[in-house]
Amino acid sequence: MEINPNLSEKAQQDYKLVIQAKKGHQQAYAELMARYRDSIYFMLLKMVNNASDAEDLMIEAFGKAFKNIDQYTPSYAFSTWLFKIATNNCIDFIRKKRASIISIDQSNDNQDSQSITIQSDTPDPEEHMINEQKIRLLRDVVSNLKPRYRTLVELRYFKEYSYEEISDELGVPLGTVKAQLFRARELLFNILKHTSAKY
């Protein structure tokens, strides 16, 4: 596929990385993230005015972009495509958040609904058993991943390491850690989807 000659030099470099990413090269994913992580984050921060939400939305945006990277075409800049994904995802988040607030307000205004049930943070025995089963299932699924992905998932989700701690522990760049975790989550999702169909 021909590159749009009107693309900037940076956009053309991005496309070369996209080609490598489509071939499964993790370093290409990491470099694309490193190029746009901060600009995506600060754009989202302006939209939601919450650092934690902006961080989560930034990760989601890259996750969606990497998952659908085969859909990208060089007729326009990768950054344009990425920012559109991030913006649309953020708008969906804001809409859902507002809908939730409106729903709560309507419940409070409903005269027929005088009681509000507050759920305890402590799970009941049945819920605890179900959670334990889910954890065992997840561990079984994780064991099917390639060693490098398995290690990342165990550190991130079972030992609850931060991205920075994983980077230090494994001696790999932070961008590579995040890119490989995106890939690991995608693999886990596919395995879990097929596993759930058996039950």
Image (cartoon, grey):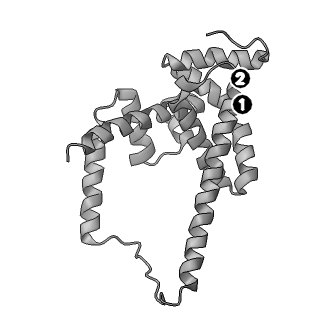
Q: How many marks?
A: 2
The residue carrying pointer 2 sits among few (fewer than 14), some (14 to 19) or many (20 or more) residues within 10 Å by Cα, namely some
Residue at position x 41%, y 72% from top?
A: 121
Image coordinates for residue 109, horizontal then vertical, percent: 58, 85
Quadrant where the N terminus lies? top right
Is 11 located above or below residue 189 in the figure?
A: above
Residue at position x 56%, y 43% from top?
A: 60
Q: Please indicate whether residue 98 sits to the left or right of residue 43 in the image.
A: left
Mark identifier at residue 9: none
Image coordinates for residue 11, horizontal then vertical, percent: 73, 20
Residue at position x 61%, y 46% from top?
A: 89
Residue at position x 40%, y 28% from top?
A: 148
Quarter-wise, where is residue 110 in the image? bottom right
Quarter-wise, where is residue 37 in the image? top right
Residue type indicated by callout 1:
Thr
Secondary structure beneath label 1? helix
Q: Please indicate whether residue 178 sits to the left or right of residue 38 in the image.
A: left
Q: How far is mark 2 from mark 1, CA to CA? A: 7 Å
Q: Confirm whether residue 142 shows in the render.
A: no
Residue type indicated by callout 2:
Tyr
Relative depth, front residue between 42 and 79? 79
Q: Label 2 belongs to which residue? A: 76
Q: Label 1 belongs to which residue? A: 80
Q: Confirm whether residue 51 shows in the render.
A: yes
Relative depth, front residue between 16 and 160? 16
Is 16 located above or below residue 51 in the figure?
A: above
Is 96 located above or below residue 183 in the figure?
A: below
- Circles 2 and 1, Cβ within 8 Å, touching? The answer is yes
The residue carrying pointer 1 sits among few (fewer than 14), some (14 to 19) or many (20 or more) residues within 10 Å by Cα, namely few
